[in-house]
Image (cartoon, grey):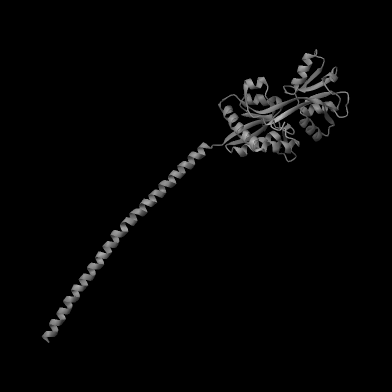
Amino acid sequence: MKKKIVLGALLIAMAGIFGGCGKAESETAAKSAEETSAPEEINESEAEAGEAEAAENEETQTAEETAGDEVITVSVGTMGTYSPFSYVDENDYLTGYDIEVLRKVEEVDPSLHFEFTTGPWESLFVGLDSDKFQMLANQISGTDERREKYYLTENPYHTAVNQLIVKKGRTDINGFEDLVGKKIGLTVGDAHNIEAEKWNEENGNSLTLVYYEEDITTLLQEIVNGKIDATLNDPAVAISKAEIQGLDVEPVGERLSETPVFFIFKQDELGKTLQEKIDAALGQLIESGELSTLSTEWFEADYTPQGK
């Protein structure tokens, strides 16, 4: 009996020893696991901080890029009655060659957005001078007077042709000498007038020049009604307007001049910025051939300076 008690006590003591060792090993393993996982938690925190910083930097960069590409809204003065360069179609949509060139410019340079305001010819330069417009688009040539007062694009986007326009079927008029004693209708301030005024001055003022505030539309009506005998204008314009009104007119004689046309800006800081940006875009359109393609679509011929 005594041996059994001693043996039982010995077994209990050994169990305690082994139990204690197992517990110690478990605690050591747990502690080791904690120490191993701690750096992982630190690494995860550092990664999260790095991602947050990268996101912040990306947002800052995006904001800076947005600010650098800020869109400039440009008010453009145009007649809106000068087909095929600037007119309102049957769907009440402003279009025309000049308008569509600027829409191409918008595609090349998204930092530019054009808003068009229409008005009579005599109001355009007044509007530019008074800051109603920031630029003009209306088949405008680069006279010395305009170059002195305004900025013009370095790149012309069209070549305007100047020719006598008469009632269809007239065979007695082919040049200025045939108009002596007859009436030529001209629009006030129109660059097309220069040829007639110069010839008249050099030939004893033998022509009767009748000036109108209205545009070519009225002049064509006056020709058909017999109130004037001829006018000067671009055949593309005259024929387009005549077709719309159902008027029978035609160009006669030789081309009196071929004049490049430009977009016009006020001589101030904004005007210079617009001139440079639009010139750059026109340069790309010329180089790619898109401008020539657009001209051919509108006139069935390339009237850009590069195509002449």
Q: Quadrant of the C terminus?
A: top right
Query: Does 294 sit left or right of 284 as displayed?
Result: right
In terms of depth relative to the viewer, which is nearer, 167 or 156? Answer: 156
Query: Does 219 sit left or right of 68 as displayed?
Result: right
Task: Place residue 231 in its image quadrant.
Answer: top right
Q: Residue shown at 81%/35% (left/top)?
A: 243
Q: Position of residue 66 (x, y in %)?
A: 51, 39
Q: Residue shown at 32%/59% (left/top)?
A: 37
In terms of depth relative to the viewer, which is nearer, 189 or 212? Answer: 189
In terms of depth relative to the viewer, which is nearer, 286 or 88? Answer: 286
The number of numbered discs placed on residues in the rendered structure image is 0
Eyeballing the image, is 228 above or below 75? above
Q: Residue shown at 46%/44% (left/top)?
A: 59
Q: Position of residue 149 (x, y in %)?
A: 62, 21
* Residue 95 makes an appearance in the image: no
Q: Position of residue 64 (x, y in %)?
A: 48, 39
Query: Does 119 sit left or right of 54 as displayed?
Result: right
Q: Quadrant of the N terminus?
A: bottom left
Eyeballing the image, is 141 above or below 10? above
Query: Does 243 sit left or right of 123 as displayed?
Result: right
* Residue 259 makes an appearance in the image: yes
